[in-house]
């Protein structure tokens, strides 16, 4: 079987890698072996540990290689997330060399190959002395805050796949799914959106601001800037519906409240296919919007602009706690709380 052959090739190369490390550093007190566990803190993908293909560990820290040297062998189906693994090993104080099966001979691995790769600037070897692990981080939020921004992709838009989360930070494209059996997250999963899914399918589902003159152009631009999943993740109004697309599509809105120049600040929407109504202030950023779902038409005697979790939020800088001036000229609020 091809799979068995690939596994045998990988296992042979891993054994040769451990043997080469032991030969090269045999004069130094070390521990060396295959499939060795390396404990992690602040892992890029939240792992508690990684299992190195081949690991040589120094009893005292080496001035160049750190706590030890990890060799990972890339061979077809054995591929790993190189950036994430490299980040984790460097963060833990280990050097790492990424080798392919073509670097190995039939009977041995020439350690000069590893040494030369560490010396070259474009090779697949990294030392904690020379490489800051943050260099490998693409996620802007993780680079500055040490964590990702995970938002769940609603199952209503997925193609017969389990729900998962997407990091919506700039530069990041990581996805993860929780595995109850292992009580851990699985990373590097593929998109669950069906192949036919395009931004135009969201044309009647997204609550747009009055400044959006052409939603189709906006969606088209966003589709090229970031994955369509990020557009969905930032839109809490996209929820399950028994309608033909699996999510709500909204009718022409009813203005509940407007500002001084007549632009709506609170709207009530009705789904085209089910009784659900949505009260929204539809402001751009997810964390700044308030959406309130109703199972049917809200009570006509209720003042929608003053209900609990009032969606009306004034943008004026007077509401900034650091700039409060006891009176907002935009909405007239005089209560700093």
Image (cartoon, rainbow, N blue to C red):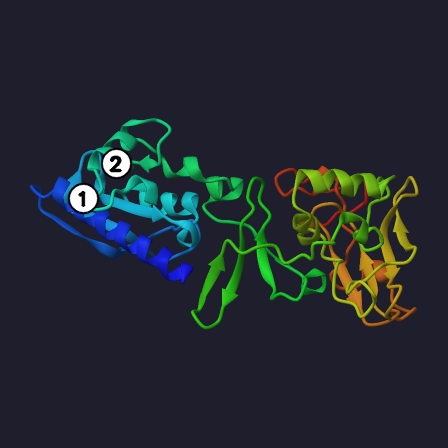
Residue at (46, 40) in percent of width and height:
137
Q: Nearer the viewer, residue 32 or 337?
A: 32
Q: Classify mark 2: residues with Cα within 10 Å, few (<14), some (14-19) or many (20+).
A: many
Percent of width and height locating residue 136: 43, 38
Q: Nearer the viewer, residue 321 or 198?
A: 198
Q: Nearer the viewer, residue 294 or 64?
A: 64
SS for callout 2: helix
Circle 2/circle 1 CB separation < 8 Å? yes
Percent of width and height locating residue 318: 71, 39
Residue at (73, 52) in percent of width and height:
289
Q: Nearer the viewer, residue 333 or 29?
A: 29
Position of 183 relative to 30 (above/below): below
Most extreme residue toward the left is 27
Position of 178 relative to 233 (above/below): below
SS for callout 1: helix
* Occupied quadrant, residue 39: bottom left
Give the numbered dot on residue 212.
none
The span from disc 2 to disc 1 (Cα, nearest Å) is: 10 Å
Percent of width and height locating residue 80: 41, 50
29 to the left or right of 171: left
Is residue 220 visible in this depiction of the protein? yes
Residue that mark 2 sits on: 114
User: Quadrant of the image for the N terminus?
Assistant: bottom left
Residue at (84, 39) in percent of width and height:
211
* Occupied quadrant, residue 153: bottom right
Residue that mark 1 sits on: 20
Q: Classify mark 1: residues with Cα within 10 Å, few (<14), some (14-19) or many (20+).
A: many
Residue at (19, 47) in percent of width and height:
56
């Amino acid at each position: 079987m091809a799979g068995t052959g690939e596994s045998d090739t990988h296992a042979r190369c891993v054994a040769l890698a451990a043997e080469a490390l032991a030969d090269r550093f045999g004069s130094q007190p070390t521990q060396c072996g295959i499939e060795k566990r390396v404990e992690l803190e602040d892992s890029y993908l939240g792992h508690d540990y990684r299992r190195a293909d081949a690991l040589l560990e120094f009893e005292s820290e080496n001035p160049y290689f750190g706590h030890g040297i990890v060799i990972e062998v890339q061979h077809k189906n054995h591929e790993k997330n190189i950036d994430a693994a490299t980040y984790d090993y460097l963060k833990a104080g280990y050097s790492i060399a990424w080798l392919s099966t073509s670097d190995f001979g039939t009977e041995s691995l020439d350690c000069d190959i590893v040494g030369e790769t560490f010396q070259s600037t474009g090779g697949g070897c990294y030392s904690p002395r020379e490489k800051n692990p943050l260099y490998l981080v693409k996620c802007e939020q993780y680079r500055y805050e040490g964590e990702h921004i995970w938002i769940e992709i609603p199952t209503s838009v997925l193609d017969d796949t389990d729900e998962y989360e997407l990091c919506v930070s700039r530069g990041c494209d990581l996805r993860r799914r929780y595995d109850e059996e292992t009580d851990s997250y699985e990373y590097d999963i593929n998109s669950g959106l069906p192949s036919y899914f395009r931004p135009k399918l969201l044309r009647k589902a997204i609550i747009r601001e009055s400044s959006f003159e052409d939603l189709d152009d906006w969606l088209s631009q966003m589709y090229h800037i970031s994955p369509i999943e990020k557009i969905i993740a930032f839109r809490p109004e996209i929820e399950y519906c028994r309608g033909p697309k699996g999510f709500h599509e909204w009718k022409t809105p009813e203005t509940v409240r407007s500002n001084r120049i007549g632009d709506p600040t609170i709207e009530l929407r009705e789904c085209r296919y089910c009784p659900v109504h949505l009260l929204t202030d539809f402001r751009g950023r997810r964390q700044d919007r308030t959406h309130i779902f109703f199972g049917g038409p809200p009570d006509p005697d209720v003042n929608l602009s003053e209900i609990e979790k009032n969606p009306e939020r004034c943008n004026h800088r007077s509401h900034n706690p650091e700039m409060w001036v006891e009176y907002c000229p935009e909405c007239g609020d005089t209560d700093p709380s």
